[in-house]
Image (cartoon, helix red, strand yellow):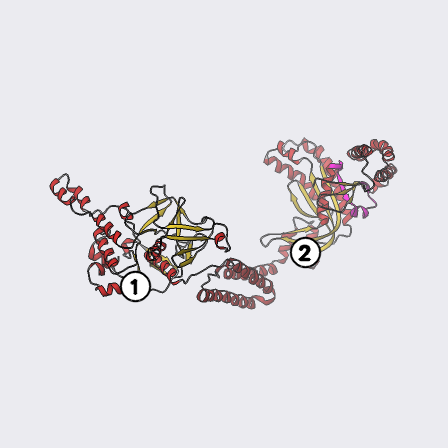
Amino acid sequence: IDDDSIRQYGQWPWPRTDIARLTLALGQAGASAIAFDIVFAEEDRTSPTQLAKRFESTDPQAAKIIASLPDNDDQLATVLGATPSVMGFFLTNEPIQQQARPKAGFAVLGTPPASVAHYSNAVLPLPGLIEPAAGIGSISIERDADAVIRRAPLIAYQGDQLLPALSTEALRVAFATESVLVKTSDGSGEVGAPGDVVSLRIGDIEAPTDGSGEMWMHYTRPVPERIVPAWKLLSGEMTEAEKERYFAGQIVFIGTSAIGLRDLRATPVNDRELGVMVHAQAAEQMILERFLSRPDWALGLERVLLLIVGLTLVLLLPRLGAAWGALFGGAAVALIIGGSWYAFTEQRYLLNPTWPAIGIVLGYLLTTVATFYREERQRAYIHNAFDRYLAPELVARIADDPAQLELGGEEREMTVLFCDVRSFSSISEKLSPDEIIRFLIAFLTPMTNLLLDYRSTIDKYIGDAILAFWNAPLEDPDQHENAARAALAMIDRLVELNETMPLQDKEPWPGEVKIGIGLNAGRCCVGNMGSEQRLSYSLIGDTVNLASRIEGLTKYYGVQIAMGETLHEALPQFATVELDRVRVVGREAPEAVFALLGDETLAADTSFQSFADQHAEMLSEYRSRNWEAAEKIRSPLAKISQNYGLIRLYELYSERIMLFKANDPGVEWDGTYSSTEK
């Protein structure tokens, strides 16, 4: 129904008698199915019954005569019943008003379709027109985000009722079959989630679909002569031979192309395609059995191409340079686009070259910019990366001689410190969010200054906790001693803060604050770590994990500073005592853990030396399962242990000795305590 037809037969909608004449002419010409991409949802306003209502008040006699004439909709219904006609209807998601009932039967092989589009409402033709028609199908087609129609639905749901699309129903009527077979993935043995549609079978034709029951459209070239203006049939201009040549045995779709009727759609090959042509092309594609498919492996292939070519370009670009890199990237993009076109034209596969191509171009641009920026701003990068984590003189040395710094990952002997505020959750309950931030600043600032004074690198702040390390990025031959002195200085500084901060009215300080410090030494991997979006100079390794676990043990043993055995061996001049042999969470090998109690001054004190020797003897008897001897040594030492902050430790050994005296652990016991908390 084009503009010429509208000019000759008047504005739309036409009288149903004209539609009936058009349909009858097609039926007499031998059309196998006549499908309407038009919804006759309202009564014909030109019908005698409608006209009669206008004369009822002014000329009742004329109204009675007019009303006795045949109804236009009844005449169309009669023709529909005598022809293989298929009525169209809309599906919407408005509140339900009408429920569509298909004339086709549906059989499902497998799990009922789960991904098919669901609608709540249908806009239907008049019931008197539905009843005599041979079929009824949906004409609703969803467009992609860019308003282009690339797929045509073959089925849809309204509520729990499966409904055919107009193209599906036109084929069913043409083939004179009663039902449509829907195959889903678990009923066909193909890949897909249960309930994903695989194909539709209509008569002898099986059409593959995606999981939602939509068919990828493979539009054929335009054939203008197969579009017949309605006026040629209505005017009688076409001879019977011409009608038979055009329509005999054909599926005929009736739709509109007049500009005022606004049924023009965008497709990949035509930005102003007739809406009815989408249904016609879908039916034609099923008849020709020339289907496009997007294989299950398509997305994986696209991602692999993006990953492989993108990584190759990123890795080679610094060596190739910008010009050769551009040549390589351009060749890769050309190959990907050419391969996609070949797959489409020769194999009818849908492979999307867009994202791999864009990824390669972006990779090239970003890598080039990053390389340029890195080379031009090396000194600024070093300052930005380290001036908040290192002492200023160390940053200056690195900036003056970048060769001292190896960016990336490298293994080194490191010393690691974890510091954590005790009962921080309880402290947080007492303070407002603003007060918590001010408290943390007041606590972390002096602690950070001490760590920097002792040449540490601040890795990160984890809420109330501090992670610091020594011997990177610059070598520190005194790393072990610096770490021990920093930890002891932090304890002394905290004593001062607990005395002075509560006296300052404007600063929130929650009473007596306590901390635990865990120290450990060993090999770590240190360098720039993270992601492409964000890097951090940090370290990883078993040494770091163990330092974190040792810090957690300070709570259990009631000490302020604890260290691993490797660091203990490197600090013979410091005052230390062994706490226990512990198997920490997530680690099979046991570790001897020591308390750091003081520096060389305390270590030289004869009273401490006597206490340390007796403490070691007590541990030896304890691990030899000589409970009485161990208790005999422990008991008098318990009072002395108060001088060194080991009250909780001696209470633990008292409890253990009593327990093991009552329940001996046996000869296989090696004296190791298995920690259950991090």
Alpha-carbon span between mark 1 and mark 2: 69 Å
Q: Position of residue 590 (x, y in %)?
A: 77, 45
Task: Say what amino acid the circle numbered 2 marks.
Answer: Gly
Camera-side residue of 324 and 270:
270
Q: Quadrant of the N terminus?
A: bottom left
**Mark 1 in CB contact with mark 2 (< 8 angstroms):** no
Which numbered dot is residue 34?
Answer: none
Q: Position of residue 94 (x, y in %)?
A: 36, 43
Q: Residues within 10 Å of mark 2 (few under 14, many from 20)?
A: some
Would you identify the image quadrant in which residue 7 lies? bottom left
Total labels drawn: 2
What residue do we see at 33% from left, 43% from top? 98
Task: Say what amino acid the circle numbered 1 marks.
Answer: Arg
Q: Please say whether residue 53 is visible from this viewpoint.
A: yes
Please state if 411 lies on the left or on the right of 274 as rendered: right
Please state if 278 lies on the left or on the right of 659 as rendered: left
Camera-side residue of 294 and 26:
26
The boundaries of the magenta stretch are 556-579
Camera-side residue of 185 and 312:
185
Q: Position of residue 498 (x, y in %)?
A: 71, 34
> Going from the N terminus, do you reach mark 1 or mark 2 first?
1
Camera-side residue of 313 and 511:
313
Which numbered dot is residue 226?
Answer: 1
Would you identify the image quadrant in which residue 451 lies? top right
Which numbered dot is residue 409?
Answer: 2
The local secondary structure at tag 1 comes to helix
Magenta stretch encompasses residue 283 = no
Magenta stretch encompasses residue 558 = yes
Discs 1/2, front:
1
Please state if 474 lies on the left or on the right of 602 as rendered: left
Would you identify the image quadrant in which residue 202 lies? bottom left
Q: Please say whether residue 456 is visible from this viewpoint.
A: no
